[in-house]
Image: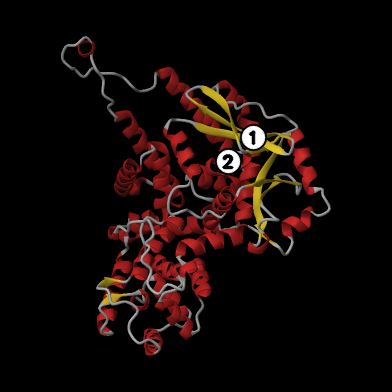
């Protein structure tokens, strides 16, 4: 029995309990499917606050109509459908400002009943298009259908989709590729009929995916620049091109689904394009002239389609952000493939002097988490992220309250990472408490480790009132972890990951004293 089947069985049991009046069961169902619901609403309304309101309205309607659900195992799909209906009603009832003829002629302003909705013909055409798309998706094999629904409809990342389906990220990408190929065959005539067909892709073009970013290690970086590796989605054939350090780091972060604390230029460009009603249809690496690689981005919107000239690194990054397909024209493919045919190419890319995206991302995270500043005892530089305490879960707040109690118990006039760790241990029924206990960390052992550390110091780490700088960083990093994992609330597990990412506080030293590595804590939280 697959992971999807198991999840459906659990949903069915919770639905039956909710129909019998168990509100806790209904709350569990909502919590499980909330990311999918809010993702659908955000895509439909293009407004975060409006999407939150629509999602809450959908939950209310679902609670009132739960008895009418005939297929309990389809609760997630049912709830998503309610959410989309709520969004459609919200879009129809939006009232743009309409001026009467008298207003335009200089007289008084009178709101006139302007019908901004689609015409009956447009509604009929939309219904036909929707039916054909639904039929094409429904005809996909179950695994491909589930991947398409989560990735394209719900807006989940590759990693989140893999976690939901219980498969590897590479398997998700393979399923999506097969699904796109099948849907392209079934829906191409439909796209032409409604004016959505992109610029024709030559039969000789090769569809590719980005599989890695390579660079030289610090002592050899001048010899081995950032190199983007593209692979044919239908074979093991590969090509590559060189880009700058910023572009290479940004691509590595996007491939690893790691969010930057502030939007990168590529994210801004995609968000602006979306806000104006545009979409990226595809990206083409079109030609190579004198070792210079050229690319175009095919952009559509408002009934038109444009080919925008771009550097290949920028074009590929936008494709990754928008999940648009990437093609390499045959002439460019042969020229780029020739570079990898050089006898030293394999060694230059994968030799001992080089490293890949995992190392690039790790170094980037190290810079942002402050590990490069380990020699500074008290950090005054804060992450550029505000922390909204309303987002912390009940358990997380209990842990922070317990941290203050621990600080007072030790006679300290500040709250540091050491007290935050003790607070997380004390909330035993929360995720972080379970993780720490499974690693053999107890409240008595942690307190003893803290006393050992302080015995080595002449004074506490900080004489500040309130919260120590590293403890503030832990809160900011906890928010980053929550957003990276797709959680609307900040839980104890995110606080624990924040302590791990901060990496240089007294809490890290306590864990070291106990014999628990930060990596083992991170891995255990990830596996939970």
> Which mark is on residue 295?
1
Front residue of 121/218: it is 218
Q: Residue at x 73, y 59 (%)?
A: 350
- Please tell me in which quadrant of the rendered image residue 291 appears: top right
Mark 1, other Cα within 10 Å: few <14 / some 14–19 / many ≥20: many
Q: Residue at x 59, y 57 (%)?
A: 167
Give the vertical position of 492 relative to 228 (above or below): below
Q: Residue at x 31, y 49 (%)?
A: 63
- Residue ranking furthest to the right: 343
Q: Earlier in the sequence, mark 2 or mark 1?
A: 1
Front residue of 28/497: it is 497
Q: Residue at x 40, y 78 (%)?
A: 506
Tell me, what colour scheme is on the image? secondary structure
Q: Which residue is mark 2?
A: 314
- Please tell me in which quadrant of the rendered image residue 118 appears: top left
Residue 389 drawn at (x, y percent) = 28, 60
Give the vertical position of 91 relative to 155 (above or below): above
- Please tell me in which quadrant of the rendered image residue 385 appears: bottom left
Which structural element holds mark 1? strand
State the CA–CA distance, disc 2 to disc 1: 9 Å
Q: How many marks?
A: 2
The answer to the question of whether label 2 and label 1 lie on touching residues, with beta carbons closer than 8 A, is yes
Residue 485 drawn at (x, y percent) = 46, 58
Quadrant of the drawing holding the N terminus = bottom right
């Amino acid at each position: 029995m697959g992971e999807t089947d198991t999840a459906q069985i659990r949903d069915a049991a919770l639905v039956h309990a909710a129909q019998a009046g168990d509100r806790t069961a209904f709350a569990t169902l909502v919590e499980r499917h909330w990311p999918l619901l809010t993702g659908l609403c955000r895509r439909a309304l293009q407004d975060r606050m409006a999407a939150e309101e629509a999602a809450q309205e959908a939950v209310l309607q679902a609670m009132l109509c739960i008895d009418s659900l005939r297929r309990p195992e389809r609760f997630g799909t049912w709830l998503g459908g309610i959410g989309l209906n709520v969004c459609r009603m919200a879009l129809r009832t939006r009232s743009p400002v309409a001026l009467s003829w008298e207003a335009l002629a200089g007289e008084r302003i009178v709101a006139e009943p302007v019908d901004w909705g689609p015409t009956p013909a447009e509604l009929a055409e939309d219904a036909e298009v929707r039916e054909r798309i639904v039929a094409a998706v429904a005809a996909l094999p179950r695994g491909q259908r589930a991947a398409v629904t989560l990735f394209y409809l719900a807006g989940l990342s590759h990693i989140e989709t893999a976690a939901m389906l219980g498969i590897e990220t590479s398997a998700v990408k393979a399923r999506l590729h097969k699904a796109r190929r099948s849907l392209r065959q079934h829906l191409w005539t439909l796209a032409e009929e409604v004016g959505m067909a992109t610029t024709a892709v030559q039969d000789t073009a090769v569809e590719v995916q980005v599989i890695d970013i390579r660079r030289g290690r610090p002592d050899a970086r001048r010899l081995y620049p950032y190199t983007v590796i593209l692979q044919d989605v239908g074979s093991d054939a590969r090509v590559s091109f060189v880009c700058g350090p910023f572009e290479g780091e940004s691509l590595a972060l996007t491939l690893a689904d790691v969010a930057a604390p502030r939007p990168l230029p590529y994210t801004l460009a995609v968000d602006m394009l979306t806000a104006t009603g545009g979409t990226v249809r595809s990206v083409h690496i079109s030609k190579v002239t004198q070792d210079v690689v050229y690319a175009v981005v095919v952009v559509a919107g408002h009934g038109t389609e444009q080919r925008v000239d771009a550097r290949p690194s920028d074009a590929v990054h936008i494709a990754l952000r928008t999940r648009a397909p990437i093609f390499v024209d045959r002439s460019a493919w042969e020229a780029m493939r020739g570079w990898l045919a050089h006898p030293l190419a394999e060694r230059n890319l994968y030799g001992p002097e080089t490293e890949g995206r995992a190392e690039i991302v790790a170094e980037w995270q190290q810079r942002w988490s402050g590990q490069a500043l380990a020699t500074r005892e008290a950090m005054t530089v804060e992450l550029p992220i505000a922390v909204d305490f309303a987002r912390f879960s009940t358990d997380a707040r209990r842990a922070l309250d317990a941290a203050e109690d621990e600080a007072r118990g030790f006679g300290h006039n500040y709250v540091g990472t050491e007290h935050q760790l003790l607070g997380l241990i004390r909330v035993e029924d929360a995720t972080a408490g379970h993780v720490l206990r499974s690693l053999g960390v107890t409240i008595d052992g942690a307190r003893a480790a803290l006393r050992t550390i302080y015995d080595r110091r002449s004074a506490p780490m900080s004489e500040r009132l309130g919260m120590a700088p590293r403890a503030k960083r832990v809160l900011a990093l906890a928010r980053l972890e929550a957003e990276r994992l797709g959680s609307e609330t900040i839980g104890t597990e995110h606080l624990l990951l924040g302590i791990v990412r901060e990496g240089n506080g007294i809490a890290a030293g306590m864990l070291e004293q106990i014999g628990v590595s930060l990596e083992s804590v991170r891995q255990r939280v990830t596996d939970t």
